Image (cartoon, rainbow, N blue to C red):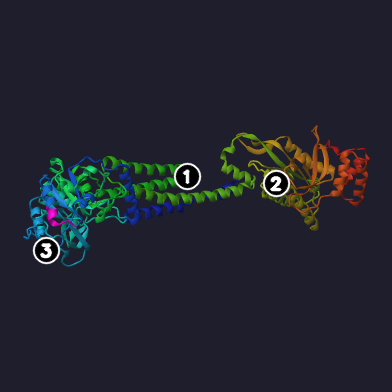
Amino acid sequence: MAEIGARLPRLPRLAWLVPLVAMLAAMALVVHDPVPLRVARNAVFDQFQRWHPRPYLAPPVRIIDIDEESLRRIGQWPWSRAQVARLLDATRQLEPASVSLDIMFPEPEGQTRADAGGRASDDPDQTLAQALRRGRVALGVALTGPRQGGDAADAAGGPLLFKAGFIAVGGEPTRSVPAFSSSVSNLRDLQLAAAGQGAMTFMPDVDGVVRRVPLLFSLQGRPVPSLTAEALRLAAGADAYVVHAAADAGGVIDLRIGTHRIDTDQTGALWMHFARPQAERYLPAWQVLEGRVPPASLKGRIVLIGTSAQGLLDLRFSPLGGVIPGVEVHAQALEQIVSGQQLRRPGWVPATEAIVALIGCIAVGIVAMRARPGRSSLLFLGLVGAIGLAAWTSFRFGRLLLDPGAPVLAMALVFAPTMLMRHRWAERRQRWMQTTFSRYVSPNLIDYLVANPQALELGGRRQRCSFVFTDLQGFTARMETMDPAVAVSVLNTYLDRMIAIAFKHDGTLDRIVGDAVAIMFSAPVPQADHEARALRCALEMQAFAREHVDALQRQGIAFCDTRIGVHTGEVTVGNFGGATLFDYRALGDPVNTAARLEGANKFLGTSLCVSEDTLRGCPGAVTRPVGRLRLAGRSTYLMVHEAQAADGQSVEADVDYASAFEWMRRGDDAALAAFEVLAAQRPDDKLVALHVTRLRAGSRDDAIDLLAK
């Protein structure tokens, strides 16, 4: 056993390279933050929002909706500029804090129109400009094209005219915000008349979902506010934006608009926390035009004018599922700013997530290398649960966006290959143990104990099993005449092959006593066909034993014939012994009976005796009936047969013998004559000679008493 222990496979020190390399790869992935990782992060944040949408606190933000009913009552879009002016005037009379148009007017409306009296009416563009001057109104513009060199190009409407100033604190903010090279703006007269202008441009993620609303843009290096920011600035009465940015192009930190401090990401975007759709957020445009809106419904509120009509295609995907009008995205952004329900993901969060990922990778790697798989898995799952709970708690109660996906993925990238390597090593170690110890016990017993370690407890159970006992006739005396080295070599070769045959048929080695072998079937693993297995095993052992004797005879070595007994019955199987030694075996009368049948062969002149109890489970087996034996120590008779072939083997039944035996079994006087004829034909058939001797001595049936063991 010392030699075995020296060869026991051990985990090499180089195995630590697996978690180390995996950790380095995982941390590189976390730092690089590829698109799939960002998509996974967005999916987690979306799920958080579905679990806990932003509570709607009825903040002072309203949408005047050019909905389907308004289009039906007033006319299809586009409306006349004069109609829009009337809508603005009707809105102004309700005293809103500011009004923002999620609509553009890049081109003149057309010719001067004539009224009913034939006089030229006012220019509709000028009518709209006058309505803009009478209130605090912001217009929407569109930014287009990637950032390029040269001057800003305007597709329509002329150069952009912005009314607000920008005060930069720290670094230069335009280096990190979304940059564009051109714009589609409003008519110059409308720009001059409006109190402000803001970009309506959204920056959806790769899946088309709007999760962040940019508050700042860059147009050829000039800072440009969004429509959301302009609506808030006009309502707050501020003249300028204060942008706090990190030095060395580190990105935007926050944005101050009047008394509001808005935490943004490094690109100057506001993380959206969407509330569920609310009917009170909208006022139909036709009701405002017809004066059906309560006077206090818009007083002091931030008002956005836009459309929810599906035909106008201003629809956006929401993390809550489905689509919402683009104007509602602006409204929800304003709601969470004004009500103090902002989501935050400060610049220190990615670094913190990377540190958590690193600590988690180290912990998981060490435990996975040292602890058992169950404990390692519990730690991994515990860390995953703790990180997920921390992220959810931060979102739910602190409105802080922490990504659990990056640390969890990093730990999984360390845990999985490490556990796989440990599993492969454990399999190799287990295979080594099975190969090694299968030389001491049966392979099927090893497999059973590996799968059922609880079977290593003392105790047993009742089980119907089949047994095969073999022995070499006269081998003890033969060894005394043989060279000891030759005797041991010949015996080892014989036993090795006999045991291999038993294992081939999934038999369990019960014991080896000298040159005798005991094989058990249907234990420890139950086998429905254990009787047939036992018979096939015994017949193959018999065939090998005869070939082995002939082979040794040709080498000049005299060997012994093998006797085999097979029996089936209910026994107690299990572990017997004590704390010092386990011995897995079967106890019961069927075990002794199988041994007695093996010994009965020398009196019967046979080499393989099988009981009728075994043959009941071997339909199609070819046998010769021996008779009813009363074995030593038994008071009852047992019907025994000489096996010749198992089911499926092409061996013809001995019809002449069967006929003679039937006469003997019935007590017919013709039995003696029949057996005498067979004896003359088969002078070497010892079983026939036995029956002739018995019948001549006065026996009248097939009952045989064997009083010796």
State whether residue 457 appears in this view: yes
- How far across and down, in percent of the image, does residue 288 sit? 15, 46
Q: Amino acid at mark 1?
A: Pro
Q: Quadrant of the C terminus?
A: top right
Residue that mark 3 sits on:
111
- How far across and down, in percent of the image, does residue 170 sit? 16, 53
Q: Farthest residue in the bottom direction?
A: 150
Q: Which mark is residue 373?
A: 1
Check the image and report above or below for 345 versus 636.
below
Counting every numbered tag in the picture gives 3
Residue 691: image quadrant is top right
Q: Is residue 552 left or right of residue 327?
A: right
Q: Residue at x 12, y 57 (%)?
A: 162
Residue contact at pointers 1 and 3, CB within 8 angstroms: no
State whether residue 166 appears in this view: no
Residue that mark 2 sits on:
533
Q: Is residue 460 left or right of residue 427?
A: right
Q: Amino acid at mark 3?
A: Gln
Check the image and report above or below for 296 versus 12.
above
Quick one: label 1 or label 3, which is nearer the N terminus? Answer: 3
Nearest to the eye among marks 1 and 3: give it.
Answer: 3
Nearest to the eye among marks 1 and 2: give it.
Answer: 2
Q: Secondary structure at mark 2?
A: helix
The residue segment tinted magenta is 78-85
Residue 82 part of the magenta segment? yes
Q: Quadrant of the N terminus?
A: top right
Quote the CA–CA distance across marks 3 and 2: 104 Å
Residue 603 part of the magenta segment? no
Quote the CA–CA distance across marks 1 and 2: 38 Å
Disc 3 crowd, CA 10 A, few/some/many (<14, 14-19, 20+): few
Residue contact at pointers 3 and 2, CB within 8 angstroms: no
Secondary structure that dominates the magenta span = helix
